[in-house]
Image (cartoon, rainbow, N blue to C red):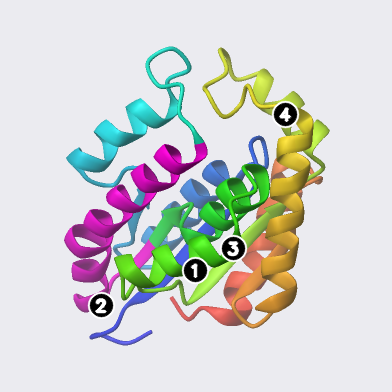
Amino acid sequence: MNATTGLFLSFEGIEGAGKSTQMARLGEWLRRSGQDPLLTREPGGTAFGERIRDIFLDPVLAPLDASEELLLVYAARVRHLRQVIEPALQAGRIVLCDRYEDSTYAYQGGGRQVPLSRLDALSIWAGPLRQPDLTFWFDVDPAQGLARAGRRGPRDRLEQEALTFFERARQAFAQRWEAEPERIVRIDATLDEEGVWLELLRHVEARVNP
C-alpha cells in the first residue's frame, strides 16, 4: 500500500461463514491503527447498487433466472467500482469489500452453473475491473453455514437455495483459491468468532502494513 494506490481487500464465503462480522472487526482494528478504511459491499456500495441489492435478495419481488441475476451483479459492480472503490484507492485508502468477483464465480458460476467462459467474457466486457490485492475466503461447511444463517432471522432469496447450491459454490471458491493462492487466503471459518478473528488478524499482520 502507498499514498497513491491504496489497498483493496475483499471478503468472501458462503452464507453463515462470518465474513461480514470479521470485516467489521478488521475495519475497527484499522481505525485504531490510525487508518481511515472504507467498508463497502456487493451488491451495493452505491445508491444504485443498494436498489439492485433489494431486488437481488427479495424472495417475493424478484424470482430471477441465472442470466438476470448475473447481469444485475455486473451492473451494480461497474458503478460501485467507478464511483466508490477506485476513488478511495486513488486517495490511498484501504478498501474492505464484502463480496466481489469471486462471489460471482462461486454463486453464478458454481451455484447456478453458468459456464465460466460466459463469466470470463462478461468480466472482460464490463471492465477493465480492478481485482482485489488480497482476498480472505472464509471457508465453512455449507450445512454449518446455513444453520448459522438461519439463526439471523428470515432468509433472503439466496439463503433459501438448496444445500447442493452452496456445496457447488464452496467448491467454486476452492477452485479459485487453488488457482490464485498468492491473492486468496483461506480462513478456517468453522472456528468460533474469536478463533476466526485471530486467524484473520494473523494473516493481516503478516501481509498488510497498516
User: Which of the image's four quarters has the N terminus?
Assistant: bottom left
* Kind of residue at badge 2: Gly
Which residue shows up at 73% across the image and 50% down it?
170
| Along the line of sight, the residue nearer the viewer: 144 or 31 | 144
Magenta stretch: helix, strand or loop mostly: helix
**Marks 1 and 2 close (CB-CB < 8 Å):** no
Mark 4–mark 3 distance (CA, rounded to whole Å): 25 Å
- Rate crowding at label 1 as few (under 14), some (14 to 19) or many (20 or more) other CA atoms within 10 Å: few
Q: Nearer the viewer, mark 4 or mark 3?
A: 3
Q: Secondary structure at mark 1?
A: helix
Q: Which residue is mark 4?
A: 146
Q: Of callouts 1 and 2, which one flags the residue occurring earlier in the amino acid sequence?
A: 2
Quarter holding residue 32: bottom left
Cα distance, mark 3 to mark 2? 33 Å
Q: Nearer the viewer, mark 4 or mark 2?
A: 4
Q: Are marks 3 and 2 in contact (CB under 8 Å)?
A: no
The residue carrying mark 3 is 116
Quadrant hosting residue 46: top left
Query: Percent x, y for residue 161?
Result: 66, 26
Dot in front, 3 or 2: 3
Q: Confirm whether the magenta stretch covers residue 170.
A: no
Whole-Å distance between the Cαs marked 1 and 4? Answer: 29 Å
Secondary element at image label 4: helix
Query: Label 1 belongs to which residue?
Result: 120
Residue range in magenta is 66-95
**Residue 151 vertical position relative to residue 98 in the rendered view, above or below:** above
Of the two numbered discs 4 and 2 on the same chain, state the one appearing first in sequence: 2
Residue drawn 63% across the image and 36% down it: 15
> Looking at the image, which is closer to me, 173 or 35?
173
Per the image, the residue denoted by label 2 is 92
Asked if residue 46 lies left or right of residue 166, the reply is: left
Find out whether the residues at labels 4 and 2 contact each other: C-beta distance under 8 Å.
no
